[in-house]
Image (cartoon, rainbow, N blue to C red):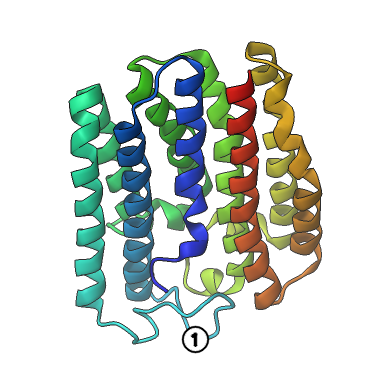
C-alpha cells in the first residue's frame, strides 16, 4: 500500500522513451537499460514511502481523506519500519546506479543523487516543496526531463535536442498524475496547510489546468515529429482515453472516481510512452 503501485508507470515510462531514442541512435546496452529501469522504480517506491511517513508526521493524511489509507497515518505499519523501508528502497536504487556510473560516468551519480534528494524533500525536510505548490514542476523535471535524457545518456553518452523535446510530453503527463492526486486531496490538504498547486489555484482552475497539461503533452509531439518522423505521433491514438479522464476530473469529486482517474492517468502515461517509444523505433 505504501509503495503505491499505481504510480509506478511514472517511473517506467520515461526510461522506455529514453532507451528507445538510444536504440534509434544505434546503441543499446541491455544491462544499462535494466539498471536504469530498476533504479527508477526503486526511487519512485522510496519517494512514496518517504511521502507516506512525512505526510503522517505533518498531519496531512487524516481519516477523512478521499484517497487510499496511508500506512503510517493509519497505524498499519510503525513509522520506524516505514523509514527503514524508505532507506532500503533508496539503497537498492544506489546499487542499480553503480552499473550506470561505470557505463556513463559521474554525470549519472549526480542525476541519481539529485533524484533521491528530490524524492525525500517532496514532503520531508524543513521546507518541503510539495507543500509550497512546486510538486508538479519537480515531477515534470525529474519524471520527464531528467528521466528521459538520463536514460538516453546511459545508452549514447551524449545528449541531443531530440531527447530534451521527447522528455516534455512525458513530464507533462507525469505532472498530470500529481494534479489528479492534489485535486482529490484539496480539502484535507488545505486543512493541513499543505499549499499544493490545487490548493493555491482552487478546484475549478486546477481541473482546467489538468486538461491543459494533457493537451500540451500531445501538442509537444509536433516538434519531435519534425526532428524524427511522423511515426512519433502514434500517441495521438490515446486521445480518447485522455478525453474520458478530463471529463471525470472536471465533473466528479468523490474519492472512488478520482482514485480511478489517478490510476488511469498513470495508465495513460504508460500507453502514451509505449506508443511514443514504438514511433521512435519506427523513425
Could you tell me which residue is drawn at 60 percent across and 40 percent down? 274
Could you tell me which residue is drawn at 44 percent across and 55 percent down? 130
Query: Regarding mark 1 in the picture, which secondary structure is present there?
Result: loop
Q: Nearer the viewer, residue 22 or 153?
A: 22
**Residue 216 on image: x %, y %:** 70, 35
* Residues packed near mark 1 inside 10 Å, few (<14), some (14 to 19) or many (20 plus): few
**Residue 129 on image: x %, y %:** 40, 51
Name the residue carrying label 1: 63
Q: Nearer the viewer, residue 63 or 256?
A: 256
Is residue 167 at least partly visible in the picture? yes
Is residue 109 at least partly visible in the picture? no
Number of callouts: 1
Image height check: is 53 above or below 75?
above
Question: Quarter-wise, where is residue 72 in the image?
Answer: bottom left
**Residue 6 on image: x %, y %:** 52, 62
Could you tell me which residue is drawn at 50 percent across and 23 percent down? 21
Question: Quarter-wise, where is residue 48 in the image?
Answer: bottom left
**Residue 283 on image: x %, y %:** 63, 18
Q: Quadrant of the N terminus?
A: bottom left
Residue 160 vs residue 182: left or right? left
Could you tell me which residue is drawn at 72 percent across and 72 percent down? 253
Amino acid at each position: 500500500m505504501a509503495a503505491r503501485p499505481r504510480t509506478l508507470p511514472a517511473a517506467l515510462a520515461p526510461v522506455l522513451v529514453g532507451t528507445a531514442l538510444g536504440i534509434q541512435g544505434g546503441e543499446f546496452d541491455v544491462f544499462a537499460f535494466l539498471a536504469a529501469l530498476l533504479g527508477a522504480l526503486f526511487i519512485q517506491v522510496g519517494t512514496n514511502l518517504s511521502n507516506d511517513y512525512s505526510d503522517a508526521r505533518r498531519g496531512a493524511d487524516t481519516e477523512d481523506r478521499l484517497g487510499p489509507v496511508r500506512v503510517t497515518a493509519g497505524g498499519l505499519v510503525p513509522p520506524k519500519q516505514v523509514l527503514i523501508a524508505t532507506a532500503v528502497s533508496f539503497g537498492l536504487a544506489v546499487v542499480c546506479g553503480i552499473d550506470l556510473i561505470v557505463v556513463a560516468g559521474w554525470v549519472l551519480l549526480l542525476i541519481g543523487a539529485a533524484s533521491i534528494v528530490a524524492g525525500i524533500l517532496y514532503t520531508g525536510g524543513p521546507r518541503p516543496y510539495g507543500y509550497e505548490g512546486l510538486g508538479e514542476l519537480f515531477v515534470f523535471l525529474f519524471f520527464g526531463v531528467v528521466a528521459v535524457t538520463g536514460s538516453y545518456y546511459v545508452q549514447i553518452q551524449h545528449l541531443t535536442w531530440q531527447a530534451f523535446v521527447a522528455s516534455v510530453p512525458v513530464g507533462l503527463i507525469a505532472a498530470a498524475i500529481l494534479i489528479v492526486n492534489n485535486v482529490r486531496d484539496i480539502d484535507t490538504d488545505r486543512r493541513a496547510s499543505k499549499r499544493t498547486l490545487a490548493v493555491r489555484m482552487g478546484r475549478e482552475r486546477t481541473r482546467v489546468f489538468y486538461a491543459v497539461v494533457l493537451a500540451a503533452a500531445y501538442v509537444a509531439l509536433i516538434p519531435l515529429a519534425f526532428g524524427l518522423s511522423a511515426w512519433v505521433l502514434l500517441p495521438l491514438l490515446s486521445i480518447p482515453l485522455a478525453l474520458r479522464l478530463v471529463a471525470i476530473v472536471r465533473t466528479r469529486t468523490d474519492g472512488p472516481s478520482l482514485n480511478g482517474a489517478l490510476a488511469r492517468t498513470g495508465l495513460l502515461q504508460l500507453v502514451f510512452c509505449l506508443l511514443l517509444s514504438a514511433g521512435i523505433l519506427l523513425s
